[in-house]
Amino acid sequence: MRQSALIAALVASAYALDNGVGLLPPLGYNTWNDLSCSRMSEEAIISAAEALQRTGLQQRGYVYVNLDDCWQDPSGRDAASGKLRADPAKFPSGMQNLSRYLHDRGFKFGLYTDRGRRTCAGREGSQGFEALDAQTFADWGVDYVKEDNCYSSSGPNDKTELFAQFALFRDALNKTGRPMIFSVCGGGDQLPFSNLSYYATDQRGGRALANLWRVTSDVTGSWTLRFAYDVAAQLGAFAGHGGFNDPDMLLGSSKGAARRLEAHQSRTQFNLWAVLMAPMLLGADVRDLTAFDLETYSNKKVLEVGQDSLAQQGGLLSRSGATSVWGRQLQNGAWALLFLNEGWFWRQKVSCSESCWSKMSFIRNSSISLEDLWSLILPTHEIVAGEDLILEVEAGQSRMLRLAPKADLII
């Protein structure tokens, strides 16, 4: 680890946001990539929650149901109280009743706002109303708040203003006494392929500011996906219990969603997000998931990697041309390895050799057990640490293994 990164990590740890929640990355559903603005409604939210229950995803840990932009009344705040209001046409029961409905069924409730005067979709933002909005959210039983980055007075990258305004909302949330995950989204008003690493590396950001902080602009397809995971891979030193780099939400392959990936790309994103200790918020149409997407998001062993209690983010171990190996250290001396073929056209051999092994904590020449987390056929279930480990991977796809000292894992 570079000295500057180590110092920054120690500073972030010393001044970490202490709100008692978000100790591991949250799992759940977010409306934006699925419903966008046009299909946002109370009926759609209830239907999504029922789908999470019906498919067993709630039992896998997907408990956050988060409303993104466009839940707010387009006519503005309440004239008498100044409070935010839900769109009465789309949410006739109101936010407090929707929150109660979700809580009664074992879910947690998330809402979106913006640090600027308007949200990215032009609804009411929280600038100048931080204390009032935080208390309103607490009164509604909100468990997760995402604050976006649009319509600020000095632009999306004015660090002095943005960190000060996000900190205002952080402090206002804490003063309510209700524990709420705080997620800052630097992606608003950003161009595609914007590197927002400074949300992690600046002393005013990272775990001193929030439980989650966006490090790139939106993931909208395969190219922005690759950019996002390459940026996040450089920032592991700044993440840990209670605070995580956020390379944006998951994109499924279900055709009903506003944004989606090809099926093999969505599974690769899921694998990478587990290695990168990223939040896993589903943007797929959970009411009509394909069998492939349901199998992807239900994979218990990959989810265990993403929720590993050591809370140590993984990253890139080696790259050769269009192939790469990614790794994350897990509890009890184990590692998760992801073998990725970033090519477009043909199957390739992806190898973990000397440079790859040197970044892991295994004792050289010790016996290692292997488990394929997608139950594919392995050439062997045992290997000696340091010996070349080679897997064939189809174009654009990935394979994921768990490696452990032999006594730790019985195949």
Image: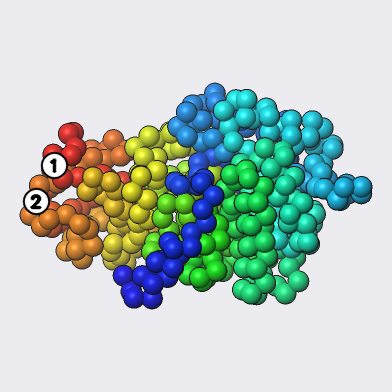
The image shows residue 318 at horizontal and vertical percentages of: 28, 64
294 is higher (above) or lower (below) than 406: above
The image shows residue 176 at horizontal and vertical percentages of: 67, 47
Q: Which quadrant of the structure image shows residue 299?
A: top left
The C terminus: image quadrant: top left
Q: Earlier in the sequence, mark 1 or mark 2?
A: 2
Per the image, label 2 sits on a secondary structure element best described as: loop
**Residue topped by disc 2:** 366
104 is higher (above) or lower (below) than 340: above
In the rendered structure, the answer to whether residue 176 lies left or right of residue 203 reads right
| Cα gap from disc 1 to disc 2, whole angstroms | 8 Å
8 is higher (above) or lower (below) than 34: below
- Number of numbered labels in the structure image: 2
In the rendered structure, the answer to whether residue 241 lies left or right of residue 18 reads left
For the residue marked with disc 2, what is the amino acid? Answer: Ser
Classify 10 Å Cα crowding around label 2: few (below 14), some (14-19), many (20 and above): few
Q: Which quadrant of the structure image shows residue 48?
A: top right
- Nearer to me, 181 or 256: 181
For the residue marked with disc 1, what is the amino acid? Answer: Lys
- Nearer to me, 165 or 25: 165
**Residue topped by disc 1:** 406
